[in-house]
Image (tube, rainbow, N blue to C red):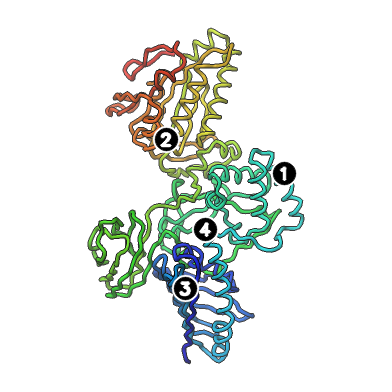
Amino acid sequence: MREYHYRWEWGLRSGPSALWPLVADTNRFNRDTGVAAVDERGAGPNARRRLRLSVLGIGVEWEEEPFEWVEPNRFSVVRRYLSGPLAEMRVAVDLGPGEGGGTRLLYEVWAKPRNLLGLLAVPFQVGWLSRRRFESTFRRYDALAAGARPVVEERAGPRLAPGGRGRLEAAEERLSTAGVGSELAQRLVRLIERADELTVARLRPYALADAWGLSRRSVLEACLHATRTGLLELQWDLLCPLCRGAKESAPMLGDVESRVHCATCNIDFSVDFDRSVELTFRPTAAIRTIERHDYCVGGPQVTPHIVAQQLLSAGESRSLPLALAPGRYRMRTLEGGDAVAVVATEDGVTETAVQATETGWAPEEIGLAPNASLRLENSTGREQLFILERPAWSEQAATAAEVTALQLFRDLFSSEALRPGEPIAVGTLTVVFTDLRDSTRFYREVGDAPAFGSVMEHLDVLRAAVGEEEGAVVKAMGDAIMAAFVRPVGALRAVLRVQRELASPSAGKRPLLLKAGMHSGPCIAITQNERLDYFGSTVNVAARLVDLSSGSDVVASEAVLEDPEVAAELAGSGMGAEPFEATLKGLEGERFALFRLTAPVEARVGKHADRHVPTAASPRKR
């Protein structure tokens, strides 16, 4: 039968880069234009998918090739139907500069009917109805893009569960009194009540914060509090390191497994808290029931870190015009293990080629200008899906490494623990150990009861300072603590603040000296004594540095000092950083480069401190 071709063009006010996140979100676009939800029936090579939907009781099944795109200008897809009124459909979307600014959006559809029903349906469904719906949706997206805000849309009429209105009002009241603040509480409640289902099914607190113009930590903490007021429930999404898609979700850390399979990329991957576990939220079923549907499973915004994706048959070559932001990228094929480093710089070349061969890539690294033409060459004997991607993970993800290192999370979810015997990497953390100096003598001189009260107060001061600097007290051991931070500068600020407060107490209280040691590096999370704990060489080193502190300084490793924020903090505050080397107990055979950090003379407190500084060779006696 004849193939129908439709070509529509619209002029929009917003530029291609602003429209791309909206237009290329094919899952939302299909929902907004009335396409039925789809069921995935299976996956094939190179991200092919077998999908099915039902229209007016008629089942339609097809094989979908992987979407091809070049951000932010064009994408396309081919669907070959196995049942239903169509035989094949191709869609191509092009976003180019408009004559007077803005965007010229070109939308093309090629549809080949399978039978008489298709011959009748295509002109009406595609040629007339779809055109009207597409234009209306693109105009709405243009208005959203002009407002420079992500899609957090509201729908007319609440979708609350029976009795949900009363529970929602009660949750808002409890949330407002939990330290969240009435304005933020109202925003969360309104979002849960009125936002569309695609938004509320997977609420990302950092993305919400950016959309609302608020601090990320305040929104994350508001969402954590909202789980205790009955408004939200949390979920841990396990992300594939290649496609970055959520392959599984677990309601508790104890349900997270250390190995997960991604059917799209056909790989098994190890879970790590630093990247592949993201905390998201959804409304509780008692307030709003969410039925999650997929309307498209393979569009560009499913994998927004991928800049360009192209499917090349064996021996095929193709040139791509690219518009890249300066930075590092990676070119790979879906079924290949190697990758080519791509660097976009002003002095890069404007035209070059990259070749996938049976033995690897040629060349091994490419330097491109921001606006360049890259020729892809498939010199293998089989089809290849070429992928150009940003290697950096999304900054809008609240990772498990960050969340579990927050004091508020540990206070609200003290029972959250990993599956017993399942250690999981958490990436780089800064681990701090503190200990009161001469605490034994302190107990003997002032008596057990007063000394114990002072020690408990010092622990409260520590917890408050650690929490305010986005860290968490992992455990307390008598008058010592272990704390963890994502940012080294937060660890340094917290310790210095507590040292100042303890050394200059209020009237009638005895000054205390707090020894502190800190080290940054990779850690492993594990459940110990029914609580989430960390272990590994980073923890071992940090635990030994505290004994090198005098109580008027902080002993930090070279890894801490190498952090740019710490370097800026030291330069701006005038703190001293005296380098020295030491051999640590239990780690003999290796000398560690360390620094003794001290406040400037005018900021020092506790002048009564003993000037003797213990070393690894002459440990202090308690």
| CA distance for labels 4 and 2 | 33 Å
390 shown above or below 181 = below
**Upstream in sequence: badge 1 or badge 2:** 1
Q: Residues within 10 Å of mark 4 (few under 14, many from 20)?
A: few
**Whole-number angstrom distance, CA of label 4 to CA of label 3:** 18 Å
CA neighbours of label 1 inside 10 A, class few (<14), some (14 to 19), many (20+): some
Tell me if label 3 and label 1 are in contact, CB under 8 Å. no
Q: Disc 3 residue type? A: Leu
Question: Disc number at residue 528?
Answer: none
**Residue type, mark 1 in image:** Glu
Q: Which label sits on residue 488? A: 2
Tell me which label, 3 or 1, sits earlier in the chain. 3
Sequence-first disc among 4 and 2: 4
Q: Amino acid at mark 4?
A: Ala
Helix or strand or loop: what does disc 3 sit on?
Answer: strand
In this rendering, which labeled residue sits more in front, label 4 or label 2?
A: 4
Asked where in the image residue 96 lies, by quadrant, the reply is: bottom left
Measure the C-alpha gap from mark 3 to mark 1.
46 Å
- Which element type, helix, strand or loop, lies under badge 2? helix
What residue sits 60% from the left and 81% below the top? 58
- Asked whether, in this view, residue 431 is left or right of residue 187, the answer is left
Q: Would you say the residues marked 1 and 2 are in contact, meaning their CB atoms lie under 8 Å apart?
A: no
In the rendering, which numbered label is found on residue 105? 3
For label 1, the residue is 173
Give above or below for 227 relative to 269: above
Residue 557, image x and y in percent?
35, 30
Residue behind mark 4: 148
